[in-house]
């Protein structure tokens, strides 16, 4: 079975943890163990988030006195792909001896007129108290918004149109290679309408929506969205909160999940299942193997056809 796995950015850097390299290296073995259990019997394409990491690099770039201007987000995204891809590859290489593994920097084409450029919603970087976030916003020209545990920077998150390296990823899969790609949703680029030349975009593409598009284009059987909660929850954060064990695309869309957190994950699962008839699941990293077999997480199945 061909599986596309969308790994949350907080898998390497948990909420509240100090953003040191040693912390992320210490967390990587848990990730590798979960993915290796799937890779023994299945073709795996592993994508990953980069919200905490790209936010950290953006702060460093904005405050570096040696720079005349901060690095643009497309180049920061490429840096995080290299860093996280290397960590994942090394950990998987140790736990899957003899397995072919490749970490690929990938680029995702977005539309220059995407309305998301005018309405930033993608959280990046660490959580701040409201007064600190406000100070940073004024100092660096950021936009900030309230997350579930505090205030964070938000940037544009345009919809992915295509992944430039899809054919290369497909070729690697035919060689029985575990492919790490699409990190942070892929480096956001805009294709010139006349020449096709690529230029960077100041954005971060949602990694779950990129994973869904990649899974569709690669004709995957299963999309596995791994996060830091065991299920999708109806009425999350209220006294009426309930875990959803089974769902369909239509039921997920009726749930009205938050745009900055569970919303992109449920939309990604819904799109993949609708467009391919395959299955998707959303849940915790440590339960990845159980989710694949329908014993954990929220399983997303196709809607039943409407009859006469």
Image (cartoon, rainbow, N blue to C red):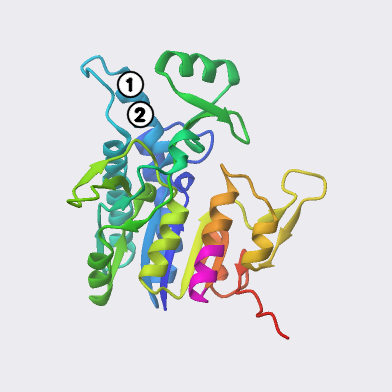
Residue at left offset 50%, top offset 14%:
135
The magenta stretch spans residue 213 = no
Question: Residue 68 appears at what percent x and percent y?
Answer: 22, 17
Residue farthest to the right, as pictured: 239
Any part of residue 33 in sight: no
**Element type where label 1 sits in the image:** helix
Residue at left offset 43%, top offset 50%:
159
Mark 1, residue position: 62
Question: Residue 40 appears at what percent x and percent y?
Answer: 38, 74
Any part of residue 25 in sight: yes
Q: Which residues are magenta?
A: 270-278
* Quarter of the figure with residue 212: bottom left
Q: Main secondary structure of the magenta part?
A: helix
Front residue of 185/276: it is 276
Question: Residue 259 appears at what percent x and percent y?
Answer: 58, 44
Mark 2, residue position: 58
Quadrant, the N terminus: bottom left
């Amino acid at each position: 079975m061909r599986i596309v796995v969308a790994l949350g950015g907080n898998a390497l850097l948990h909420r509240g943890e100090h953003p040191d390299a040693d912390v992320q290296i210490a967390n990587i073995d848990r990730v590798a163990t979960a993915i290796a259990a799937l890779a023994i019997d299945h073709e795996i394409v592993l994508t990953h988030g980069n919200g905490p990491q790209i936010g950290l690099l953006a702060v460093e770039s904005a405050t570096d006195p040696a720079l005349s201007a901060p690095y643009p987000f497309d180049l920061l995204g490429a840096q995080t792909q290299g860093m996280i891809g290397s960590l994942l590859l090394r950990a998987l290489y140790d736990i899957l001896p003899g397995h072919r593994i490749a970490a690929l920097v990938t680029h995702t084409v977005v539309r220059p007129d995407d309305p998301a450029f005018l309405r930033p919603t993608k959280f990046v970087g660490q959580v701040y108290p409201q007064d600190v976030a406000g100070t940073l916003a004024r100092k660096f020209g950021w936009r900030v918004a309230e997350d579930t545990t505090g205030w964070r920077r938000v940037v544009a998150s345009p919809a992915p149109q295509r992944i430039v390296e899809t054919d290369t990823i497909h070729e690697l899969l035919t060689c029985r290679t575990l492919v790490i790609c699409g990190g942070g949703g892929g480096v956001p680029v805009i294709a010139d309408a006349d020449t096709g030349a690529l230029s960077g975009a100041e954005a971060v593409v949602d990694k779950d929506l990129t994973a869904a598009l990649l899974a569709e284009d690669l004709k995957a059987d299963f999309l596995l969205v791994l996060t830091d909660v065991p299920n999708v929850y109806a009425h999350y954060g209220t006294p009426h909160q309930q875990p959803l064990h089974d769902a369909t695309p239509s039921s997920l869309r009726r749930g009205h999940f938050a745009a900055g957190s569970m919303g992109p994950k449920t939309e990604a699962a819904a799109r993949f299942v609708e467009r391919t008839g395959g299955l998707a699941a959303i849940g915790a990293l440590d339960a990845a193997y159980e989710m694949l077999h329908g014993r954990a997480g929220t399983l997303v199945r196709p809607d039943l056809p409407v009859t006469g």
